[in-house]
């Protein structure tokens, strides 16, 4: 029709309900989610047909590390009862995931442990006395992270995960052949740091591997009260990275899956989320009473799936392990525990001025002022002691 006011043609109004909107373009996912999905059941090697293909030398090495790790946990727990450790979060029952995480890394790679992962740090070669420095109350870390390529043991939940992503991303930008392996418990997956780390890692395709040790409880909170996801490994799909579900008590399976994830990260194929389904045999720490929230029957059920016993059964069945060799491995673990006791029985020599040494590369004016005040107090105390000693000699 023609407008009588303007003389220009205007479209005829369509009847209500007859207009057909232009359909949007067909939507399709940016990434096929199927290859990212974890197996419906935890991946296993020991006790399956896959075990026959496993390298016997590797299995024996894993067994030795498991036995030593079990003895380490027992010794560290005993040290808390003797007052040599303030607190100890045991990994008894989780040794397979701990030692595998350390063994799959190359020398230039970085391990980012949580506070519970001192065994992983020890398996990577860290002096156990230094590994326990934080839990003893001597140091915030107790070792040089750059020397050992082990990030500071982290008490705040999941804060080490974004650090791992940042280091891995920076290494790739610099062209360094470095992979970061970050460890966290099931409770840590409920933290915002977990989300941020996985999101950045996937977007940047950073060479990082996330290992979640799902030991059933975040202190006293069971996994069912933390998430409704089918598994923690399923969370990977939402970020665009593969998720792997593994029997966390099967050291051979853990080593295989983590090795593959590290290879993929090193080859530029991005991050992987690995969930190790395991169980915390001991309490959360020596200060926790686990009987308040779980039954003895539940614990005993998991004892039948003990990682040390699983490996011992496999090796014995294949004729690779006899009583003599078992005793030799146990003796090696006892010698290791004796060295740990000896190291922990020696009182550390601590310099109060170290409070200011490892805070900033360049001290702030406030720290310089505080350091000067402490130095003056220490000097005055030393002079007073010297004067008192001289007075007594007269």
Image (cartoon, rainbow, N blue to C red):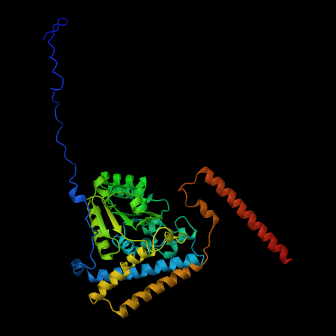
Question: Which image quarter is the N terminus in?
Answer: top left
* Residue occupying image coordinates x 24% and y 78%: 48
Q: Furthest residue to the left? A: 1
Q: In this view, does 141 lie to the left or right of 158?
A: right
Q: Furthest residue to the bottom? A: 324
Q: Report x, y in % for residue 96.
A: 37, 75
* Residue occupying image coordinates x 38% and y 52%: 196
Q: Furthest residue to the top? A: 4
Q: Report x, y in % for residue 131.
A: 49, 71
Examine the image and state in which quarter residue 390 appears. Answer: bottom right
Q: Which of 109 and 286 is in front in this view?
A: 286
Q: Can I make out residue 65 in this image?
A: no
* Residue occupying image coordinates x 33% and y 81%: 310
* Residue occupying image coordinates x 34% and y 65%: 275
Q: Can I make out residue 303 in this image?
A: yes
Q: Is residue 58 left or right of residue 224?
A: left
Q: Furthest residue to the right? A: 394
Question: Which image quarter is the C terminus in?
Answer: bottom right
Seen in the picture, residue 304 relative to 226 is either above or below; the reply is below
Q: Report x, y in % for residue 102.
A: 38, 71
Examine the image and state in which quarter residue 208 appears. Answer: bottom left
């Amino acid at each position: 029709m023609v407008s009588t006011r303007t003389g220009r043609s205007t479209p005829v109004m369509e009847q209500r309900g007859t207009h057909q909107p232009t359909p949007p373009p067909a939507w399709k996912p940016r990434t096929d989610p199927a290859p990212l999905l974890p197996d419906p059941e935890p991946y296993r090697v020991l006790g399956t047909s896959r075990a026959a293909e496993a390298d016997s030398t590797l299995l024996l090495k894993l067994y030795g590390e498991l036995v030593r790790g079990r003895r380490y946990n027992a010794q560290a727990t005993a040290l808390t009862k003797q007052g040599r450790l303030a607190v100890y979060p045991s990994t008894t029952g989780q040794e397979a995931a701990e030692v595998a995480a350390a063994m799959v890394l190359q020398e230039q790679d970085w391990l980012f442990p949580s506070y519970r992962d001192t065994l992983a740090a020890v398996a990577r070669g860290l002096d156990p006395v230094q590994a326990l420095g934080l839990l003893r109350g001597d140091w915030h870390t107790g070792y040089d992270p750059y020397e050992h390529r082990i990030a500071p043991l982290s008490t705040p939940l999941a804060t080490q995960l974004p650090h791992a992503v940042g280091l891995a991303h920076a290494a790739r930008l610099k062209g360094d052949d470095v992979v970061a392996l970050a460890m966290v418990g099931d409770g840590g997956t409920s933290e915002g740091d977990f989300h941020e780390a996985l999101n950045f890692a996937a977007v940047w395709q950073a060479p990082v591997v996330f290992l979640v040790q799902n030991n059933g409880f975040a202190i006293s909170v069971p996994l069912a009260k933390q998430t409704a996801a089918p598994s923690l490994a399923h969370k990977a799909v939402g970020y665009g990275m593969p998720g792997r579900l593994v029997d966390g008590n099967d050291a051979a399976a853990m080593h295989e899956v983590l090795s593959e994830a590290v290879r993929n990260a090193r080859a530029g194929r991005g991050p992987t989320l690995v969930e190790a389904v395991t169980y915390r045999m001991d309490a959360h720490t020596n200060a926790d009473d686990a009987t308040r929230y779980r039954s003895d029957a539940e614990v005993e059920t998991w004892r039948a799936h003990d990682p040390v016993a699983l490996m011992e059964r496999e090796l014995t069945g294949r004729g690779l392990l006899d009583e003599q060799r078992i005793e030799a491995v146990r003796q090696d673990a006892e010698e290791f525990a004796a060295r740990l006791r000896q190291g922990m029985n020696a009182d550390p020599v601590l310099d109060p001025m170290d409070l200011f040494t490892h805070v900033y590369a360049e001290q702030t004016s406030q720290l310089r002022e505080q350091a000067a005040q402490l130095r003056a107090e220490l000097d005055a105390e030393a002079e007073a002691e010297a004067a008192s000693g001289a007075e007594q000699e007269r």
